[in-house]
Image: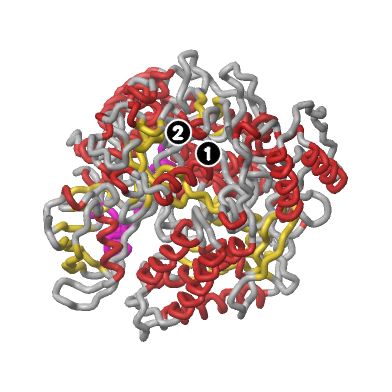
Amino acid sequence: MPENITLKIKRQDAPGTEARWETFQIPYQPNMNVISALMEIRINPTTSEGKKTTPPSWDAACLEEVCGSCSMRINGVPRQACTALIDKLEQPITLEPFSKFPVIRDLVVDRTRMFDALKRVRAWNPLDGTYDLGKGPTVAPVDQEEMYKYASCMTCGCCLEACPQVNENSPFVGAAAIGQAYLFNKQPNGKIYANDRLEALLGPGGVGDCGNAQNCVRVCPKEIPLTTAIAEMGRQLTWYSVKRFFSR
Amino acid sequence: MAKRVIVVGGGLAGLSAAIRAAELGMSVDLFSVVPVKRSHSVCAQGGINAAKNLKGENDSPTIHTTDTLFGGEFLADQPLVDGMCKKAPSIIDLLDRMGVPFNRTPEGHIDFRRFGGTLYHRTAFSWATTGQQLMYALDEQVRRFETQGLVEKYEHWEFLSLVLDESGNTRGITAMNIWDRKVEVFKGNAVILCTGGPGLVFGKSTNSIINTGAAASRAYQQGVHYANGEFIQVHPTSIPGADKLRLISESVRGEGGRVWVPMNTGDKRKAVDIPNADRDYFLERKYPKYGNLVPRDVATREIFDICVAEGRGVEGQNQVYLDITPAQSGQKAEALERKLGGVLEIYRKFVGDDPIQTPMRIFPGMHYSMGGLWVGFRDEGKMLAQMTNVPGTFAAGEVEFQYHGANRLGANSLLSCIYGGIEAGQRAVGWVGSHSDEAPASVYDGERKRQEGINATVMGMTKGSENAFALHRELGNAMTAKCTVVRENKGLDELLGKLDEIEDRYRNININDTSQAMNQSFGFTRALWDMIALAKAIAKSARLRDECRGAHFKPEFELHKPEASKIGDAADHDGYRAYCGEISTKWGAKFTLPAKNTTEMTPEFTDYMDKWVEIQRKWSSATLATYKPGESQPEIGYREVAMTVQPPKPRIYK
């Protein structure tokens, strides 16, 4: 059992400023995760060289891997910091912010583009109102199970971070939004507007921009079959384009 | 001025309020410290209650009301609970239409499972991440309203204060952009606070670490009453961790999970190798009818008792087994995976063991606050449902105190959040309809300047030697030790002293960081002040309630129940009938009194009932804490509970 844990954290004071690395050492305790290590650092923010510094900033909320907040690159891999157990990580542990999103400070990034993508693909069921309209449609258990897989997407951003097609100059919506479009095209009520979602995924930034690297499905913390959704949406788009061509 | 409703908080209650207000055509400004999709409601696991009666059990909303009132030991205002339980079935339908992937029966209907404090299958669920699934459905609807221009989101914005005019009416809020610390005023004559529970006041809890309780505390420090603060639910089953306590849902017991410890505390065998004969299923032993599904406060005290008082925890530690292995639960591994997947996954990821193969090790953890901002329920005069005592300020969800009384039943919180949110949204729209004038500019500017002043003070805390995060640990440890499962007046007095000490030391904090961008040390230090104020309201309320009710357990004032064999049906007793008569007169309620029981009452039972009735006369009231600026502790008052639906009776689970 090691006495200390060593973490190398990529620091950046504000948007657009130079990044730097700081190294911290904290006492080892059993069952620690990256979040509890970061909590220890802020109690005494001093680098391993003994230099006083500011407590690193990081995003976190539920710590149970259901909120999607604490995304970061840990030893180079995009993942959630809460489920990154210290005992299973090689040291020194490097923590970096996601590189495909603007840095706000230290490990905190702005993931607004992901929520904008959900607007683009109209990821919701139509709803007349909250008043009582009686029960919803019956659903086969097997369909519920299929939908649940995609409904567990936390918009954490790991799939975008790992994707070679996502970068500053690319409008690609990314796997998460395509997965949600697939989900709502499968929903008994959602499929009423299936064509609107397909329309949104045609052209630049849509499904056609996927390079089939399949990194998304490898890094997804919820193990969502994202490549299946992309392939399925590709098929739906082909049919949609053909039909649209002949109905002109 | 333009009519707008301000919603603070984007969990189930906040999103429900925003949706209801927006569908009535109202413009909504929605504030949240995180993107609303990441709000704490995502952590809810087991399900949401509604008496849909889809299992042929003759369940009904009336029985749901009875279970909820009984479970909360008759401390909730009854007409509100009744309204919620009656609306519950249509809320399930609404969520279904929104696309929540509820688990299904073979015929394709929504499946229901059992939860604590009821004998019916009344809990709809989506695997075991029901809160997350409900959140996403509501989040999607809010996004739809966003694209229609009806909802404007302010994510990464923190609520700082209400803007109140000279007469104390709500005029808007001040909020701070967390990323750059800019303070702004937002005008709106109705504000709905949906900011969740105060988990961080107890240090580590099952709450998300964003649940500081600061927003509730800020409203409380501006004059909103904090009600029933002493009622803190400690969940029986959580996994202790260095960073938080992770919830293991009650649904595990709903699906057949059994709680046990080895008969012989020194038993060195692996859990799976210990035969049934050598296991003590203590909940089933003590409560043959409800078994492992007694309400949370009861289960928590029993587990606490076994571990702390009797020293019989697993390996002598503070832990007991929760056994969902197929052999014990009677369910196949695939079925368990489908119904409990999310929970099993948490245990596998954070502990490393597979609950399908071996029993989990769990211990109670602070989970939920039944108490919160006081909201009225009368529709006549000024008082509106979900509105606080500050005109125009509403509250919904865990941040307010209604619906759960002294103890919340599992899977009732998601329901109360959505129901309360919808009610609040509707009432707030009505309120701004008749209150649309604008206050003088000085009202808004004055509040903004006051908040900027507080920020400047906190930013100037650079000379001290205390660390805010370390001081917070001390606060949490003190609150957990003295103000959770077992409370003693001596300990609570010590706690109140300790809170004064923490408040003094607060002034000596060094924030270690004076940068403008995303300064978390600054933000946490500011919130810590509010956590201390709220801790005092909770501790003082607990100190003054000298009885045992629901989650509030004070052994010095425990009314010991007669042995099980000597308990008849409490409702048949003369003392109880007299009390029914009294509350009928008091609140004008018409209760059908039970027929006189011919069974002879034992003297023990008569004595018990007489004492019980006395306690009800004294304590059937909500605690109201009022903040007193410049004073060390809040003023505590009481307000009688509205018992217009059914008379209380002794809360005995068999």
- Quadrant of the drawing holding the N terminus of chain A: bottom left
Does the residue at mark 2 contact the one at mark 1 (Cβ under 8 Å)?
Answer: yes
- The answer to whether B479 appears left or right of B165 in the picture is left
Residue placed at 65% from the left, 34% from the top? B566
Q: Position of residue B341 (x, y in %)?
A: 35, 31
- The answer to whether B438 appears left or right of B342 in the picture is right
Q: Indicate which disc residue B251 carries.
A: 2
On screen, residue B446 above or below A176: below
On screen, residue B298 above or below A46: above
Residue B164 part of the magenta-drawn span = no
Chain of the residue displaying label 2:
B
Identify the amino acid type marked 2. Ser
Judging depth in this view, the residue of B440 and A29 nearest the camera is A29
On screen, residue B300 above or below A102: above
Q: For numbered disc 1, what is the local secondary structure?
A: loop
Judging depth in this view, the residue of B623 and A65 nearest the camera is B623
Task: Tell me which numbered mark, 2 or 1, is placed earlier along the sequence.
Answer: 2
Chain of the residue displaying label 1:
B
Q: For numbered disc 2, what is the local secondary structure?
A: helix
Q: Position of residue B476 (x, y in %)?
A: 43, 63
Q: Residues within 10 Å of mark 1 (few under 14, many from 20)?
A: many
Residue placed at 57% from the left, 27% from the top? B119
- Quadrant of the drawing holding the C terminus of chain A: top left
Q: Position of residue B164 (x, y in %)?
A: 67, 69
State the residue position of label 1.
B410
Identify the amino acid type marked 1. Gly
Q: What segment is highlighted magenta in the picture? A: A98-122
In this rendering, does residue A122 appear at all? no
